[in-house]
Every structure is written in structure tokens, then in C-alpha cells.
Image (cartoon, rainbow, N blue to C red):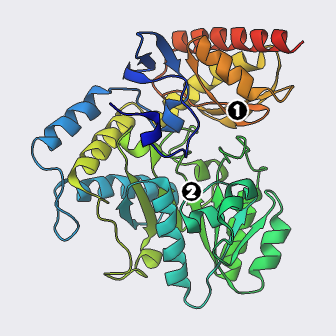
Amino acid sequence: MTRAGDIMTTYGPTRVTFVSGSGTELVDEHGKTYLDFLSGLAVTSLGHARPEVTDAISAQAGALTHVSNLFGNEQGPEVARILAELLEDATGHHGSVFFCNSGAEANECALKLARRFAGDRFAVIALTDSFHGRTMATLAATGQPEKQAAFLPMPERFVHVAIDDVEAVRELLAGGEFAAVIVEGIQAEGGIKVPAEGYLADVAAACREHGALLIFDEVQTGLGRTGDWFSFQHEGVVPDIVTMAKALGNGFPVGACWARDEVAAAYQPGDHGSTFGGQPLAMAAAKATLTTLIDIDAPAAASASSEQLRAGLLDLPGVIGVRGRGLLLGAVLAEPMAREVVAEALVQGLVVNAVRPDVVRLTPPLTVSPQEISEALHRLRTALSTTMGAAS
């Protein structure tokens, strides 16, 4: 039997243990059902136990699970082709893909690639309130000092500027020492912050002017969640490097880093690697996930459901605004009681989370139904009313 002390205390105590799920529903160890409007942090975009993904994983597990990157496998090239086609449609550039296991690793790959491409320039610009991962390099890129404090000193030459301050980016790039700028289309962990219209396009133009690469972190925003395949499409921006994970395996750990051909060519054999990256089981999950996301037109699904969810959130007591796009939304509260609201929502059978003291994040599966959205709004209304009543 597993004891609580057997797991490192990197996470807080769990209030609920889930044992099964189907679509938008989760079931805990006592048989209580919940509506999952968090999707494991924007991971299960096709919902839980999606048959196409389950069947693909099961079939691959019975055939071949792992051989390492010393050898080829049948699944990896096909997944790379699908991603390359999606990104070529979005950027106008052909590129190639490196497979890994998580968003942090995808961003690590991107940062190393930018330095490899840039030669003697190795500094990187990132934004305050950003989040790019928990490895030392991606943590250094993350613009949240509270997450870095326990691990100082950080790796050098990561410089943070305020979101929407394009002049700061231009001034730094003009110095000629920066290899890249890394941005998110929506700062999800930063409070569901959407950059001002035109800002990302101005950053892209500054990168082109000064020969720096533009890295787009699409780990949470990518693969349909914001109403386009990638969040950079909303601004008409063309990045040089794009990172993905979360929704890519619908729950199976898999990440990817895409770069346009000229940039990708900077990597040579032996420059980078990952023991489990691109292994057959992960690739089977990713192939089934991508194929299904394409079949259901994931961006259109997110856009269609977004309108109902956004309007319903604005009608709730204590909600003064809604940030985000598609089905990556943040309900902005009048008071800093997001944690209390999230705890009460769990009591009501609704899974959401707090990304800031006054922001509740909602990232339901892209397959969520209108009826499920209505029921989730009802449960969140009850949670808000209960929390506000207890505070008064």
C-alpha cells in the first residue's frame, strides 16, 4: 500500500482521488462524479478514455512499446508529418520536429536550438508572468520570481520584460546579443493574460529586424484550444520555433518542438536527445489524438463552445470579467477568493483551478456539450454564492 510519505512533497495534499473518467466526467474512489473543466491542465482535449486513443495505445502496447532512438519506429514519422503539415499551413514554412516527453522538455529543446543556431549570441528575452517549465533553463525563462526563489542562482542571460512593452524588446534586441525571444499567445499560468492586439506582431518584426529567433510556447494553447490550431495564428505571427505538449497525447506524456527547416538544420546528430522521446507507445497516442482532433475540427469545436461558456461566466455573481480565447478562459473575480471558490466547486462536483488569487481557470475538453457547460455554470454559481456568503 502506498503511504503519503512515499511521494515527495512537491505538490500539496490531494483532496480527491480519481479512479476513472469518460468524456467530460471523472469518478472518484467513492463513486462521486464530477464535471472536469480543467482537463488535467488543458491535456485531455478529447475527454477521458477517448476510444480512438485508448484503442491505439492498447494495440501498440501489444506490439512494441520501446526501442530507443538508435532505431526507427513506424509511428514517429507519421506523427511528425501531421504536425509538419499543420504548422506549414499555419506558418507557410516547412519544418521538422523533435519529440520529447513534456512541455518543459520541448521548451528546453527550443532554447538549446536557438543558441545552436545563433552561434555566439545566447541571451534570451522572456516575459514577466510567463511560464515555460520546471527544468533549470525553462525555470530561468519563466517570469515568476516566486517559482525561482528556492533555486537561485538561475542560469544566466535570461532577461524578462513586461508583457506589451514592445519598446523594451526592441531596445534589448538592438544590442545584438540575443538569440531569441520566447512568448506565449496567452499567459495561462500567469492569469490567462492575452497580449494587447498587435504586440506579438511587433515583437516578431523586431526579431526579424535584429536577427533573433521567435519561439512560440504553444504547450497549453496549441492544437485547437484557443479556436485556431495555434495561438500565434490569431495575430498573424510567423514564429521560427513552436513547442507543444499537453493535448498532443490526450493524457499520454508526449511533447514536440518544431522549427522551420533553416533553424532545425542547426542541430547535428548528438546535439540533443531524449531516451523516451518519440517512442512507439507515445507516438501511437499522439497519432490517434492528432487524427481525431483533425476529424472533429478542434478549433471550430473550441470556438463554438467558447461563446456559451464566456457568456455564462459573465452572468455569474462575483465575476467581473473573462479573459482568454476559445476554451482557455479565466473568470476574473471581484475579490481574491479564487482558491476558496475552487475548493467549493470541487464539493459541488466541478473541477477547475486558481491561476491567480482572483482568477479561476476553465479548460474543459473541446468535446464538451452545451448541456455540460450549462451544468458546470450552475455548479460554479453555487460555489461562488456559497463562498461569498461565507465571507460576508
Is the residue 79 above or below the residue 165 in the image? above
**Amino acid type at mark 1:** Gly
Q: Secondary structure at mark 2?
A: loop
Give x and y (percent) for residue 82: 33, 52
Residue matched to label 2: 133
Which residue does the image show at 56% across and 57% down from the upper left? 134
- Front position in the image: 40 or 45: 40
Q: Check disc 1: other Cα within 10 Å, few if <14, some if 14-19, many if 20+.
A: many
Give x and y (percent) for residue 227: 56, 37
Specify whether residue 193 is in view: yes
**Amino acid type at mark 2:** Gly
Which residue does the image show at 67% across and 14% down from the upper left? 380
- Which quadrant is home to the C terminus? top right
Which residue does the image show at 29% across and 59% down from the upper left? 276
Is the residue 150 above or below the residue 369 in the image? below
User: Which mark is first along the chain, 2 or 1?
Assistant: 2
Specify whether residue 239 is in view: no
Give x and y (percent) for residue 260: 46, 70
Marks 1 and 2, how far apart at CA = 20 Å
Q: Is residue 202 left or right of residue 250?
A: right
Q: Is residue 27 left or right of residue 151?
A: left
- Front position in the image: 211 or 14: 14
Give x and y (percent) for residue 282: 28, 49
Residue matched to label 1: 330
Is the residue 315 above or below the residue 83 in the image? above
- Which quadrant is home to the N terminus? top left
Asked if marks 1 and 2 touch (Cβ < 8 Å), the reply is no
**In which quadrant of the rendered view does residue 251 lie?**
top left
